Amino acid sequence: MSECFTFRFVEPEDQQRKSLAIFTEYKVGLDAISRILKQDVTDNLVPKNVYLITSSQEGYSLQECMQDKAFISEFDSYVGEINTRMHCMASSPDGSLAYCDGRIVGSSLSASILQGGMLELFKKHGGLIVSNPAYHFVKPSGAHCDKFIRASNLLVSSGEVSFLAISLLPHFKPDLKRIYVDTSSIAFLVSIATRLYSNFENSAPAIESFESYAALNHSYDFIEDSSSLILISATTSGTLAESLLRKINIPKSQIVTLFHVNLPADQLGIFDVSSAIEGGLTSTNALQCEFCRRGSKPIRIAGDQFLPENPKHELLVIRKPDFSANREDFFRQFAAARVLQWNQVATSSSGVKEHFYIDVKAALEREVKTFSSALEKAAKRYISKDLKTVITLDDPGSKALYKAIKPHIERGSGVEVESKIRHLTALELSEIDLTGSGSVMVIAGVITSGRSLLAIARKLRCIDPSSTIVYFVAFSKLPAHDVKVQLGKDLKQGGHEFVVLDECPVPRIKEYNKTAWDWEREKLTPFGEDDPMGDEDAALPLLLDTRRSEVIADSIDSDGLFLPNSKGETLKLRRTFAFWSDLGFDEARLDQTSQADVYWTIQCVLHDLRTKSESGGLATAYHTTLISPANFDRYNDGVIQASLLRSAHPVELDYRVDPVFSRQMTDVCLSVIRNWDNDQGEAVLEFLMALWSRRMQLLTKHIDELLNCRSDGMPEVIQFLLARLSSMRE
């Protein structure tokens, strides 16, 4: 019944058997109370005691209840002796609870009742908004969190709100004139509390919203005297109260938080909801956000309400047309030719390895007609006769490109002039030496971010104003076309030129990005005596022990990106690769294919899908698309499946967001595990590693199905990985 709020709670002296509280805003007939008792006992068994509570001064009395023979009969039938098991209470204007005979209820029992009822409402109405692996929240403070408290969710029924309002009353006083709330959504609760208080010297206080953190960013005229009270709806850290105390001159006793977790000891709070938050609550600053590192989408909490729509989850089936014509042109020239490599050192000076590495020298030596023609045309067009200086970036690719266009420089400038052209590396570049210089050509084999060219551009501001700079680039790996356009605008200021012969947009993998190989390293490292922090007793199977040494030493090459099949054989591409079907590769060319070539291909496809607009792509702010399990059936070469597993973001492989998705992916995994000894299951170790590292996740009940596949006839390495999954369940 809407006029009654019922809940079970634990009395302070009895932690085993719960009592029943029935709260009514106004008195209702005892026949209605009888029906509530009957239903509650039917659902929850017999309570220890029954507490009949009202927020009206004209509440129930035990004597009144005992005069109703029908009620006594019902009570005795369902609960027991009414004299000892029935207690009538009412709330006072000061927020205390009193028995019908005027005795004040003990503070511990009163707290148990008020806290127990609040927790019931908090759980019933979803006061905690919980993220899932696809997204997390950004609080108004800027902190990132996996859960946040939404107080307005509890304010559904006037009777329930009246119950909550009782706990606000101790913080009111007769001379209170204004109450500031951080969100208008709790004004309903505050207005009912002011009505229950009824002891104000004049009229009820005004209620105004200061819109949470907006009051800190913009001028808000708080009246800073003893007749003001500030109510904060909810907090998981107390930062808003701390910020207000720094900005305005109001004592701590006049700032009160309603619902709270982790409230600082020096702040006032009413409802502690810690016990209702399973697994705790994570809140961290943006730079240290583990959710962001996993690819989870940040959703900002703003205004009085939240979430204009519920996040959606869909599956994406990757199709051949997702490999665009531009991609086909690039891979036709450079795939399966040892040009596209993985995790190679870009410059000897830095020693930093590039995740996506283009071997410019190998590309030039191939003398691909399209690329060679573009090189020759660009060289003829942009090498000027007044060229005075050539600058190359400090990497083998840039030096190889310089060597390739040097004959064009000689022909374009003339032999006599060419001998006077200075050749410098970026490390040798000095503004003093180039002051007033003539035209300059800057040569870069590959650009990944463009920062090196921008750094050189700053140093070249000293050349003669009438001279030009040509930035001559063989390959761009900039992640998006608009990034390339912006870089071009920055470099071309002053009438300069920016020339890129070919491009292959790929994801920007920085030194601190966590790749699939980093996840793998974290899992394998503890299994070894060389790890002082290792705490794993189990011995690695030989195959994984060898792999452990390789990932720790970072010695995996372009042919060993993925775990082998269960027999230790390298995963190789078969002849039917859908994305390459129109490239015209012959048998000899296909024989040169490396695992890096396949990985590059899949990464490019996924990258293009991620950068698509709302329809047809991967994730947007409220739309998370997972890699459809159907893809692993459509592309069933082990090396392609491994590329998908390693290329996808963890959030794109988290099938826990929907039981149907988890079921579908479980069926794929079951098929792979059961076929471990043939081509259909050649990527079994990659699937199990993805699950063990939690880059791919399924519902727990579905993990149990995979564990049930274990048999003694399986190779040791598969049994080991299944055992690791089992240990994660314990």
Image (cartoon, grey):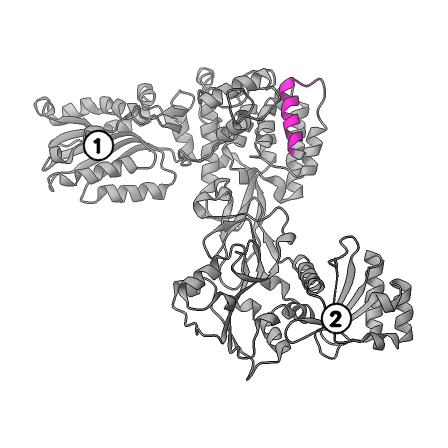
The amino acid pointed to by label 1 is Val
Q: In which quarter of the image is residue 96?
A: bottom right
Q: Is residue 714 found inside the magenta-colored segment of the image?
A: yes
Residue at the spot of label 2: 53
Asked if disc 2 and disc 1 are in contact, CB closer than 8 Å, the reply is: no
Q: Position of residue 319 (x, y in %)?
A: 53, 36
Magenta segment boundaries in residue numbering: 713-728
Residue ID at (57%, 17%): 543
The answer to which of 621 and 81 lies nearer the viewer is: 81
Residue ID at (51%, 78%): 177
Badge 2 element? strand
Q: Quadrant of the N terminus?
A: bottom right
Name the main secondary structure of what is drawn in magenta. Answer: helix
Residue ID at (21%, 32%): 442
The amino acid pointed to by label 2 is Ile
The answer to which of 247 and 212 lies nearer the viewer is: 247
Badge 1 element? strand
Count of numbered badges drawn on the protein: 2
Seen as rendered, the residue at the extreme left is 416
In-image side of 77 versus 224 (left or right): right
Residue at the spot of label 1: 442
Q: How crowded is mark 2: few (under 14 residues within 10 Å), some or many (20 or more)?
A: many
Q: Specify whether residue 35 is in view.
A: yes
Above or below for 444 versus 226? above
